Amino acid sequence: MQLSGTALAIAWSPRASGAQAVAISAQRVFDGAKLTGAATVVVERGRITSVGALPAGFRGVRYDLGDATLMPGLMDVHAHVAWYFNAQGRLHTERDGETPAQEAIAAAGNAYATLVAGVTTVQSPGSPGDKDLRDAINRGAVPGPRLLTSLGSLSEASGSPDELRQKVRDFKARGADLIKLFASKSIREGGAQTMTDAQLQAACGEAHALGLRVLVHAHAAGAVKAAVDAGCDQVEHGVFATDEVLRLMAQKGTYFSPQCGLVFRNYLDNRARYQGIGNYNDAGFRSMEESLPLATAAVRRAVNTPGLKVVFGTDAVAGAHGRNVEDLICRIEEAGEPSLQALAGATSLAARSMGLADSLGTVAPGMVADLVAFAGDVTRDATALRRPRFVMKGGHVYRNDP
């Protein structure tokens, strides 16, 4: 049976694929590491069973995508799906009068927009409301990407080393998948280190003892170095990281999630929606304008640091959901990252950073069937990432465009 057309409204239902085998063919396949020619990926009961030629005598559903690149679902290691613009068109805050129902609807909408754009896994560091959204997605109640969340964050104001250890345990008890630390100020405030070395060591050490990974917001080189020295798993942003600190990260095996441009451009494009809320002021917006070339340069230096594990994290906030690939395009076209390296950072390497590489991030037999396809050859034209044609998560089809 040959299927075509768009089924966005119903394809997320478990009835859309069931136990029937599915074969997806495309002119090229990126498997998470390398690009190959035309191939067919067969999926049964939510997992990939073969990659290559269509098995003889295949009986099941077929999707022939033609001139497209089939690849693992993209994985954004840093996105804030709970952030949205309220009914007044302004950034939602706790005091704007929005109801919990409105918050839930907005988050679900952000999740859906992200999924159908080709991002099948998101790590959110993090909001308390993420827990209900994560669990609803896992139950199949709403369509969305796989969601890992820290449920909140800790900072220098969270207390002494012992108090931080207890708060890490509290997050674990509430169901957090990871821990998020703010070790520096916002880039809108200069990005200087805020958490002490002792605080970072306590939080990261306790998290590891509980089996949790730690992501650290850090802009200044000193803050990045302190996070690496404390043994934390991943550094976010790092706009002011020096070459010496980048080499230290590579040596220690620390994952790095820098942003190339989407988050800054999104803030600037939506300035009126953010202006006057918290540190979204004139000085803050000037800082973001000045940071755009610095961010691109930081990504360029990072991807050219031998051995540094650079993963795809957008820091997508209100206004950016569903446009996550813009940061990947920026990394390739503006920061000069080789396309295969950038795609690996958004698939197989991202999966390793989140502890999911045994089931996600690679197109291979036995892996969970999170598969996406983009029109054309994304390795030759990064803008093809703006043209998703097919989205499958866990063997269920959420998008199939002609």
Image (cartoon, rainbow, N blue to C red):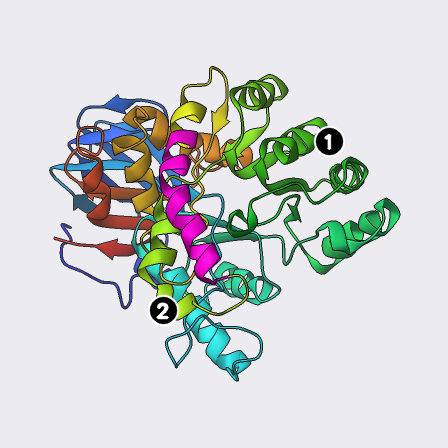
Looking at this rendering, what residue extends furthest in the right direction? 162
Which of 149/368 is in front? 149
Kind of residue sitting beneath label 1:
Ala
Residue type pointed to by label 2: Ala
Q: Residues within 10 Å of mark 1 (few under 14, many from 20)?
A: some
Taking depth in this image into account, of 68 and 382 the one nearest to the observer is 382
Q: Which secondary structure, mark 2?
A: helix
Q: How many marks?
A: 2
**x, y percent for residue 350:** 47, 35
Q: CA distance from mark 2 to mark 1?
A: 39 Å
Residue 230 is marked as 1
Residue 298 position (above or below residue 11) = above
> Over which residues does the magenta segment extend?
280-298
What residue sits 55% from the left and 66% below the top?
278
Q: To which quarter of the image does residue 7 belong?
A: bottom left
Q: Position of residue 181 (x, y in %)?
A: 66, 47
